[in-house]
Image (cartoon, helix red, strand yellow):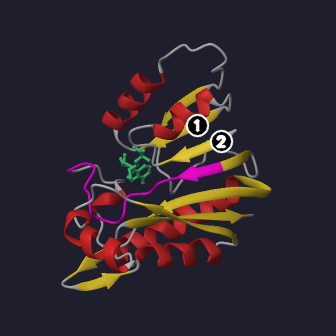
Amino acid sequence: MVLYQFAGGGTTLVEAKLLNRDIIGVDVNDIALERCREKTDFDIENAKGKVYIKKGDARNLDFAPNESIDLICTHPPYADIIKYSEDIPEDLSLLKVKDFLEEMKKVASESYRVLKKDKFCAVLMGDTRQKGHMIPMSFEVMRIFEDAGFKLKELIIKEQHNCKATGYWKTNSVKYNFLLIAHEYLFVFRK
Ligand SMILES: C[S@@+](CC[C@H](N)C(=O)[O-])C[C@H]1O[C@@H](n2cnc3c(N)ncnc32)[C@H](O)[C@@H]1O
């Protein structure tokens, strides 16, 4: 069973179904959950993964027993860069960086609890900029997962297109061969 907390638009639910993997998508937002239901409501031959969609908080996965999950794929909000709701109290996208990171400790510890030993937990995270300074939030999240007990297996850089900074930096970064914030990190941890 795959766990996909912060399910949002449900991309990974669709891919899991296509790959014949059973998956649980968790989100606090009813609109996101409805979108997940719509997107995964298809029949394709050989796409037999079962999709379970659940309203819940990634900081408290009490529906999942200890060591019951085979793989975690997760894509948390990047603190409050994009607010996914206006007033859902459990929505971590309403929190400033410091409070967001504090709450991510609970997400990391729940992830560690529910994952089977030796299995993988993949976390997609980006960084931000505040008042002209770089905030390397993704590395803070990486440390939080390490502190929860995970070991980093791979660090994958995913190029990000069409983000706010892309147009501004693109020409010079291609010309001089450097990357500013135009990517996200996919941290692959092992329990
Ligand atoms: C970055 S989006 C996920 C995007 C998704 N990976 C996709 O491909 O569309 C973040 C999602 O996290 C959800 N969220 C915020 N706080 C949460 C929490 N405490 N527990 C579970 N989901 C939460 C938001 O409602 C939002 O849908």
Residue wearing tag 2: 2
Which residue sits at x=58%, y=37%? 24
Secondary structure mostly seen in magenta is loop
Q: Is residue 10 magenta?
A: no
What amino acid is at disc 1?
Answer: Ile
What amino acid is at disc 2?
Answer: Val
- What segment is highlighted magenta in the picture? 72-86
**Disc with the residue nearer the chain's start (2 vs 1):** 2
Residue wearing tag 1: 24
Callout 1: SS: strand
Callout 2: SS: strand
How crowded is the residue under tag 2: few (<14 C-alpha within 10 Å), some, or many (20+)? many
Q: Is residue 73 magenta?
A: yes
Picture coordinates of residue 5, whole percent (x, y):
51, 48
Q: Is residue 140 left or right of residue 177?
A: right
**Disc 2 from disc 1: Cα separation:** 6 Å
